[in-house]
Each structure stands twice: as structure tokens, then as C-alpha cells.
Image (tube, coloured by chain):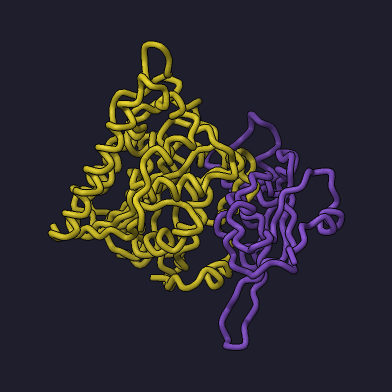
Chain colours: A purple, B yellow
Amino acid sequence: MATPKEMLTDWDKVQFGAVLPAFEDPEHKKRSKFHSYNYSVADWRVEKPVFNRELCIDCDFCWVSCPDSCFIVEEVVTKRGKKQAKIVGINYNLCKGCGVCVEVCPTPIKSLLMFPEYVDNEEALKQWPKKDK
Amino acid sequence: MKKIGSLKEFACTPDRFQGGHRLCPGCAHSMIVREVVNATDDDLVISTATGCLEVCSAIYPYTSWDVSWIHVGFENAAATISGAEAMYKALSRKNKLYNEDRRVKFVAFGGDGGTYDIGFQSLSGAAERGHDFLYVCLDNENYANTGGQRSSATPLGAHTSTTPRGRVSYGKKQKKKDLTMIMAAHGCPYVATAIPSTKHWKDLATKAAKAISTVGPTFINALSPCTTEWKFKPEETTEIADLAVETCAFPLYEIEDGHKLKITYRPKVKLPIEDYLSRQGRFSHLFKPENKWIIEEWQKQVDEYWDYLQRREEAGV
């Protein structure tokens, strides 16, 4: 079987039954460069979601409803020994800026907000709405 | 069958359908696909009919799938997956399996064009032959990939590029085909409807896990709101899907063994159908005074269908 590199010599030399493997090394789940995970759709968006870790309650609603699987999840084991997903951040290479995550965020002051693309993330966190006293 | 616990546990599943595909921002297709492929721990073989999902997830040389994936034509997603399943059975009979301790499950995805219209013959045949596979229909109610033509899933009065609204026409004149009931009439052991939403994520995930673990042909009809052709803002996808359930325009139910119907979600207060229609640009012409009768007709049909489902659930037939 031809390797992806051999297949991509010329457009008219694509082989029949070409296989595009998702993983270069399936054992360690090392993604090949032909996996769309390594492709960037960042230039699609006008506004970007900014994630505020301090307000997040780890409900994972954003993870389940994100169409582009761009929420980075870390596995944490709780005191009771249960597995639990903790949202760590957003992969801005994959995010298209649709805003579904902001819509579904359930916290009283949303832990995800849309900001224009040119605003720095740290700048955005400073502009976050404060709690009413 | 994978146990679907809380969302916090479910979110620990490594994604098998990755981002970086070129579906529209806010597309519900990828939400459904992610949940379905994450709802099992077994190895998967997936075939996808031509449509948005296939076109956007496999632009050469990129692929978004971490599972075995076959792309086929519009009309034969179910035929291909039944062929793959038959070959797997034959190999296992001859003890020639590559990896014997892993079980392989077969899933086919199709849009509503590839399921309701063009792919219906192969789906019907595969269901009749009784292959062990799950078919998921991503029902966005038009041919979104080719520019929004009407399909037999398009509901009454909807504006599409082949049933345009205007002085003469009010959009599509026919009502939606009830494919879920047609598949149940094939005697499939498990048939269900589902939507992508945060409120009903567990509904979809458990239905997918149940369908994948059921032996025999199973079918899930998932409503997939299309931001481009239904004409709403990308961030409203899950809201629109929720409204479809709350107004009973797309009720959530499952049918076992072709007859045991169970409604899996009952809205506490059944909202009027206007709430669902008014949020979508494709129905905006229905709110003109001369088209009011279409909304009344819609409401009548929805009420009758909801009544029918409830009576059928009570009677258990």
C-alpha cells in the first residue's frame, strides 16, 4: 500500500483505493499530517469564544454541543474515584466561531463569551462582566 | 452496550470524529455524529452516503475520522455497510479475523436526501435482509449540499430553491414523509428519533448505544437544523432543535420490534407551532395574512400526530 507521501506526488497520479490513515502511529494515537485535526479553520471566524476558567462549573455542555470538537478536555479523578472531564481551554485552530458554546453555557455569568477576533484573551478576561452586588 | 452515565463521564471519551472538517459553523451534523460514534467502545466501520457530512469531513488529502470509513454514492450507503457486515460474518465463520478479541460494529450515515429519497431502496433492502447495522439519518430537510433543493423530508410550506415562495407559490405543497414509521414497518428491532441538544444529549447517546448494541437492522432519525438553508443564526442550532421537540413538530420516541412505541420525552407545556416556525427564515412568508391557513394546517397535523403517538403508546401496539 502506498504511503500518503507517495500518493500526493501529483493530482493525476492519485492511486486507486488510496488509504488516508488518520493515525501515523495508531498505537500512540499520533495523528498524521493528513488528519483534519492538524488543519486550521481559524480564518473562518469573526468573533471568538473566550473561556473563563474561574467561572466554569465543568458541566461539559459546551463539549457535547461543540460542532468542531474544539474544547480541550482533561481527565480528572474525583475523591470518590469517579472519572470526570475538566475543560481546560479552546483549540483555536479548530474553532469556527459559531457561538453555540456561549448559547448553552448555564452559569449565571457566562464562563464563555464572544469577543472580536483582534481582542487579546487576557484583555478579554479583564473586560468580563462582574457580579451584581 | 456502553453505559451512558453523567455528561462528565461521557466527556472523558476520546473523540473519534475530530474537528477541522469544513461543515458550516454551527452545523448540527457533527454534533450528532460525535455523539453517535462516542456512544460505543467497540470498533466501528462507517459508511457515509454523499451529502454535507461526506463532502466536508473528507476533503482530499484530509480526513476527520478516527474510525474505518467508506465513502459511497448517494444511493448505496446501506448496501455498502450490509456488504461489509456480510464479509465480516463470513471471515469470522472462517476464523480469518484480523483481531478476534475486538468486536466490530457497523454504522451508516446519510443525509435526508440519501435516506428519504435516493438511498431508500438500499436502506429498505438492507433492513429486509436483516443485516446487523445502525443507520443514522441526519435529517436537515433539504439537499443542503447542492444548494437547498426540496426533498421528501421538507415540511409543508417551506421555502427551498426548487419550491420558492412568491406570488404564485407558498413553498412546498406536500407534507413530510414519515420515514421513522416506515422503517418500523420493516420490522426493525429498534427505531428511534433524536435531536442534537444539550437538554437531550443523553436521549441521543443512549439511543445510539442501544441501537449499536442491538442485533439486527436499527435506524435513528436525527433532526439536524441547518443554519444555511433554514436561515437562522449559527448559535441558535440547539435552541431550534429544542423548539422542534417542545412544539411536537419532531417528537422524540422509540419503537422496539416494529410495534412497541415509547415516547421518550413529553414536553410539559406543548408550545404552539408558531414558536418553531417564526425562528426560521424559510417559513417567514407563512406569517403573511394570505398564508395563515398553512400554519393552522401545520398545527392540526402536529396535534393529530402527537395524539396518534400517545394513543399508540397507551395501546402498546
- Pick the front one: A117 or B110: A117
Residue at 28% x, 54% y is B191
Q: Which image quarter is the N terminus of chain B in?
A: bottom left
Q: Is residue B304 above or below residue B66?
A: above
- Pick the front one: B111 or A113: A113
Query: Does the rendering let one see residue B86?
Result: no
Q: Name the residue at the front extreme.
A: A133
Q: Name the residue at the bottom extreme.
A: A80
Residue A27 x %, y %: 62, 67
Q: Is residue A43 above or below residue B86?
A: above
Residue at 45% x, 65% y is B40
Residue A85 x %, y %: 61, 71
Left or right of B135? Residue A91 is: right
Query: Does the rendering let one see residue A126?
Result: yes
Q: Is residue B308 above or below residue B140?
A: below
Residue at 42% x, 40% y is B276
Q: Which image quarter is the C terminus of chain B in?
A: bottom left
Residue at 21% x, 54% y is B310
Quarter of the view holding residue B36: bottom left
Residue B159 x %, y %: 43, 25
Left or right of B75? Residue A6 is: right
Residue B305 x %, y %: 23, 44
- Pick the front one: B314 or A23: B314
Q: Is residue A65 above or below residue B289?
A: below
- Pick the front one: B20 or B139: B139
